[in-house]
Structure formats: C-alpha cells, structure tokens
Image (cartoon, rainbow, N blue to C red):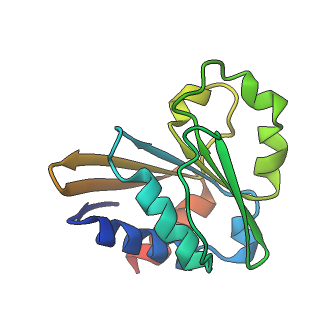
Amino acid sequence: MTMLIASADRMEQLGGSLARQIDGQMGSGLVIHLVGDLGAGKTTLVRGLLRGLGYAGTVRSPTYALIESYEIAGITVHHFDLYRLTDPGELEYIGIRDLAANSLLLVEWPEHGAGVIPAPDLVIRIGHDGERRHVELVARSGFGQRIIDRLDG
C-alpha cells in the first residue's frame, strides 16, 4: 500500500489510523520497522500512533536514549531509534528479543540492528520530496497484512 502525505499533521493522522487497526492481542508481539532518511517523519508517525492508542504525554524521539517505553491501554510499546547504534550486539544486552515478545515494538533505523532485531510484521518506508512524504506499507506477516487490509478498508 502506497500513499502521499502532504503535511506533518497528516503524518500524525496516518499514525492514528494505524493505531486504530491494532487491537490488544495483535499489539503484543507486533514489530514495525520504520525506514526513511533523517527528517522523513518517522517519529511524527510514531507520535500519531501513540496518540491513537491513547497516550497523552510528551512523545520524545529516542535518538539519544535508544528506547522510550510507554504503557497504553494494556499494551506496552517500545520505541527504538537505532540511528546512533554502533554495534547491533548492544541490543542483546538490553533484551530486545524479550521486549519484542510481549509488546508493540517500533524500530526506527532497523538496518542498524540487522541480525539482532526481530523480523518485522510491517515495514513502513517514508521518502520525502520537500513537504510531501511518500509512504509505503509492506506486510511481512499475517498481522502486518491484517493492519494494511483494515487500513485500506
């Protein structure tokens, strides 16, 4: 599924729409990879998704902290930003596989954790051309396909 997003507000709205497609059962163990250049809108999309799940607090980019975690409506969400990660093996020390098994895992810059991070259920690729964003959603599992089907329907 591919779409054109015209503004940051629309990117947040897309995140909110994605959140509405994730039920509690699906949210536990769901892995979403977010791929795109700096400034593409990955964290903006995550902010919209978290808001759509019911989170009302500040959403920070985990660029320096590596991970920000949220407990929302019975779903634990771990938002990773691997941009500054120098060794994917470091993720083993924080237990990324255990975290992914029982939560919704959102991973920015997944290529920096190659070989360690769990395979995605859904890959979201964001490219930008000025203010416009080209967003492609690619299912890599039945859960990922169900999200796309619900979003498309």
Residue 127 position in % (x across, y down): 28, 46
Drawn side of residue 15 relative to residue 133, left or right: right
| Left or right of residue 12, residue 7 in this image | left
Residue 113 vertical position relative to residue 57 in the rendered view, above or below = above
Residue 24 left/right relative to 22:
right
Question: Which quarter of the image is occupied by the N terminus?
Answer: bottom left
Q: Is residue 96 left or right of residue 8?
A: right
Measuring from the top left, give residue 21's x and y in whole percent: 55, 76
Q: Residue at x 60, y 26 (%)?
A: 85
Q: Can you give x and y, in whole percent of width and height, for residue 112 in the image?
A: 55, 27
Q: Which residue is drawn at the image coordinates 35% and 66% (left, top)?
A: 11
Number of labels in the image equals: 0
Residue 34 position (above or below residue 23):
above
Q: What is the x, y in percent for residue 20?
A: 54, 79
Question: Residue visible at 60% across and 46% down?
Answer: 120
| View extreme (left): residue | 130
Q: Residue at the spot x=80%, y=48% of the render?
A: 99
Image height of 76 relative to 32, above or below: below
Q: In terms of image quadrants, where is residue 69?
A: bottom right
Q: Quadrant of the C terminus?
A: bottom left
